Every structure is written in C-alpha cells, then in structure tokens.
Image (tube, rainbow, N blue to C red):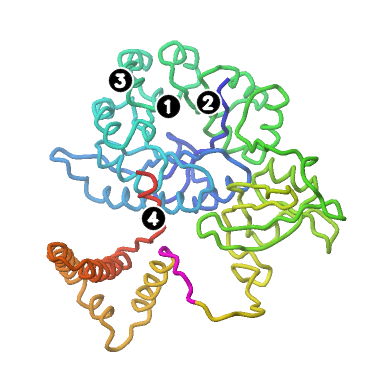
C-alpha cells in the first residue's frame, strides 16, 4: 500500500493565509506562523496555493497592479520554502513555463499544473522535459468542465510527464483511480477524522490535504499512530536499531552528538533514555533526557530553538548516536550557535578552509559594507554606482576569464575567476541572493 501523508495547505492571498480556494477569509496574517505550526506538528509536506491576481492580458503582459501582487506572493513563497522543514509544493498562477520555473526557483520541490485550465494541459510536456517529471504535478476537480473527461482524455500525457495529482474534489476518488494509475492527494474541506482511514484505504491515495489537515494539524501525531494501529503505512522514521541494540552507560543512557546537517558544525552533546529515543523517532524533533532536571527534554520547547531530525547514526560500538539536524536558532542555552566555544588549548596550524565557508565569509563582508559603508571601499563604490555598474564589471570580468583561458598560465584563470566571483557576490548582495539558495538550486538540478 502507498505510504500516506498528512499535508496541510496555505492558501496565499494578498500576503495572508486565507480559508480556501474560494474563501478569502483570513485565517493568519503571517503565513510563516502557519509554517512554524506545521513544522512542530510533523506535517509531511506543504502545499501553497498562490491565489494572487496575476491574470494575463492579450500580448502576455500582466494587468496593472496584478504583477506586483504575484511577485509579492512569490517572495512570501520563497520565505515559506526556507522556513519549512518539509517539502513544499507550489500551485496557482501557472500559465507558462516561466511560472513553473519561478515556483521551483523559489524553493518548491514540485510545481502544480491546473488541469481545469486548458493552457496548463498544453505546456505539460514542455515543462516536464525541461524540469523533470518528478518536479511536475497536476491538479483538477475544482472547475466547471467535466473533470473526468479531461482526465481520461489526457491519461497518456499525465502518465508520461506528471509525477502525481492533487484531486480537489473528494467525490471523484474512485473515478480518478479508474482513470489513471498515478498517486494522488485528496483535498478535503470538512470530514470526520475517523473517515480518514476510509480515504486512506484507496491504494492510489498517497495523502490528504486541505482544511481537514489545516484545522487538525495538532492531531497529526495521534492520527499517524491510529493509522499504524490499523496497518496503514505513514511517513515516519523507521529505526534500524531498537533501544535494546544500544550499549548504555551506567545510567542506562546513550550520549548523542548533535551536528548541523548543512555546515556539519558540532552543536552540542546530550543524553537519551529509551523514552527520549522513541519520542525523537515519532516526532522528528530531538528529545533528550535531562540528568540535572531528571525529566524528558524536548529541545526548543521553551526557547523555540527546535532541532528537526535529518538523520540518526550509531557509531561502531552502538554506544553513541550522531544526530544531524536542522537547528532553529541557537543550540546552546547561552545563546551561542554551538555549545563548543571554550577553547582549552591550541597548537599553531594552517587551517584548511572550507570552500563554502570562505564564500559565506566574503559574502558577509560585502553585506556589512552595504549596511555600514566604509570610506574608500571599492565595494561601496560599486553599490553607490548602482546595478548598471555592477553588471558592467561582472561582464568585464567574465571576458577576462575567457582571455585568460587562452593563455598557457593556469594561474591567470584562477585570478580572473576570483575577481569574477567577488563581483558576482556584490551582485548577489544587491539582489538579496544567498549562497544557500544557489547551492540548493544546484543540488536540485
């Protein structure tokens, strides 16, 4: 049976989260507050529907005022993707390949084509070949056209170029299963929670989304437990080792070393007992046992500095656990990012630079120059002259790389690439682009 997912939605309209596709009642002024709520309650994915007015006039120009609203929605979507601990699916306002690209570049794992819109059907093959089938979904069931006729007529297109569906009308579950073999999410507005088991009994239903999850997101843990009790597979950590497989210390605990999954920085060390271990696996948030307080300790419960599990690995003797986490805020109770800052002793040595850290450090210096201008600074000179000057220099440096590459001395290429990267980082600061966004985009290609 297909693994089932609990997938909340954010219906984004005029910068706020509203009730639904056809209901603009505001439910949350700041959509990022909902993201935090869904993070904490172990949501499996998140669908964001952009309901901003971005309709196209003839000639492919945005209606006056609508373009700005749509671009503002994309900026919020970018923040949502950065804050979400789960994959984000972007939907709404897709009319051409460029719109799909914007959703994916904002950080969405997948983009949704609206199959109640004939124009979206027409671009399916093109966007799938461009970005990959795994990046493309299709939604249907909210229009006035005969939905099943549309689905049946485009069965081959969907099977070849789309990775999954979002069914917006739950009354069409059986018909959808008969029409296509693709997995699909079902959007449900209102339903008794115990009816979810019936929905999940359908093989091709891979998840439930909509207000039934939005309004009951705090029940996701218990709903997953109910599913497991009824032999319905759900998204969760499947541990390769039981607690009995670990070698414990004299207190019956196992030490845990915690590491940032992005930078690999060591953040802290704590201890787990069996209950902390099981709760960590169930919730996806690091939970320890506090020896000083003699109680279970959910990291971040009071500070908000949660640690979301990315992986847990046992050492060779199974007496220590390495946890790679997504750290919210500071790991240390002192407010420091890492607990390891009290230097005991150090021998002089030449530190091998982490390339990404070098890029981050240079970018931070450039950011600081923009915030705190320094007299005589070439960086400030570029910012003062504006975007055209920055672009002119970037173009010149790109040309210098080409010229240097024609010369026999490879060092010249190295010097010119360094100059180019510096000017590129000035542009990144000017356009508010981070290295994390660049590396994420590269990793997703």
| Mark nearer the N terminus (4 vs 3) | 3
Residue on which disc 4 sits: 437
Q: Examine the structure image and report whether residue 355 is included in the region drawn in magenta.
A: yes
Dominant secondary structure (helix, strand or loop) of the stretch shown in magenta: loop
* Pointer 1 local density, CA inside 10 Å: few below 14, some 14–19, many at least 20: many
Where residue 379 sits in the image (x, y, percent)? 28, 78
Q: Nearer the viewer, residue 296 or 173?
A: 296
Q: Which mark is residue 164?
A: 1
What is the span of residues highlighted in magenta in the rendered image? 350-356
* Cβ–Cβ under 8 Å for marks 2 and 1: yes
* Cβ–Cβ under 8 Å for marks 1 and 4: no
Q: Which mark is residue 157?
A: 3
Q: Nearer the viewer, mark 2 or mark 4?
A: 4
Distance from the alpha carbon under mark 1 to that under mark 3: 12 Å
Asked if residue 333 is positioned above or below residue 42 in the image, the reply reads below
Tell me the quadrant of the picture where the C terminus can be found: top left
* Cβ–Cβ under 8 Å for marks 2 and 3: no
Q: Which mark is residue 206?
A: 2
């Amino acid at each position: 049976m297909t693994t089932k997912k609990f997938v909340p939605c954010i219906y984004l309209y005029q910068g706020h989260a509203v009730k639904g596709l056809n209901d603009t009642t505001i439910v949350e002024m700041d959509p990022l507050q909902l993201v935090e709520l869904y993070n904490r309650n172990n949501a499996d994915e998140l669908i964001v529907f952009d309901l901003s007015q971005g309709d196209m006039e003839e000639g492919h120009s945005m209606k006056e005022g609508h373009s700005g609203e749509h671009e503002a929605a994309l900026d919020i979507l970018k923040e949502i993707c950065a804050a979400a601990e789960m994959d984000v699916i972007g939907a709404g306002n897709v009319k051409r390949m460029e719109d799909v690209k914007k959703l994916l570049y904002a950080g969405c794992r997948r983009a949704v084509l609206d199959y109640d819109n004939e124009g979206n059907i027409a671009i399916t093959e093109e966007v799938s070949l461009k970005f990959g089938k795994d990046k493309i979904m299709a939604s249907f069931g909210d229009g006035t056209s005969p939905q099943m006729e549309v689905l049946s007529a485009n069965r081959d297109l969907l099977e070849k170029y789309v990775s999954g569906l979002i069914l917006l009308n739950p009354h069409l579950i059986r018909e959808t299963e008969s029409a296509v073999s693709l997995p699909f999410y079902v959007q449900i507005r209102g339903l008794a929670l115990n009816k979810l088991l019936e929905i999940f009994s359908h093989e091709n239903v891979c998840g439930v989304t909509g207000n039934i999850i939005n309004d009951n997101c705090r029940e996701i843990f218990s709903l997953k437990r109910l599913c497991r009790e009824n032999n319905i597979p759900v998204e969760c950590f499947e541990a390769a080792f039981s607690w009995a497989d670990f070698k414990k210390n004299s207190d019956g605990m196992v030490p845990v070393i915690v590491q940032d999954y992005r930078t690999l920085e060591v953040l802290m060390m704590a201890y787990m007992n069996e209950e902390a271990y099981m709760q960590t696996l169930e919730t996806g948030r690091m939970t320890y046992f506090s020896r000083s307080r003699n109680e279970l300790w959910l990291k971040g419960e009071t500070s908000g500095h949660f640690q979301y599990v990315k992986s847990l690995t046992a050492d060779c003797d199974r007496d220590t656990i390495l946890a790679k986490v997504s750290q919210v805020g500071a790991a240390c109770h002192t407010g420091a990012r890492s607990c390891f800052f009290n230097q005991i002793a150090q021998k002089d040595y030449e530190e091998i630079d982490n390339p990404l850290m070098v890029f981050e450090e240079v970018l931070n210096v450039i950011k600081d120059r923009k915030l705190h201008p320094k007299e005589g600074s070439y960086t400030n000179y570029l910012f003062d002259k504006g975007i055209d000057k920055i672009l002119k220099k970037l173009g010149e440096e790109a040309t210098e790389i080409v010229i240097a590459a024609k010369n026999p001395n490879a060092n010249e290429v190295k010097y010119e690439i360094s100059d180019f990267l510096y000017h590129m980082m000035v542009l990144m600061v000017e356009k508010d682009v981070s290295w994390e966004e660049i590396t994420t985009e590269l990793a997703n290609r």
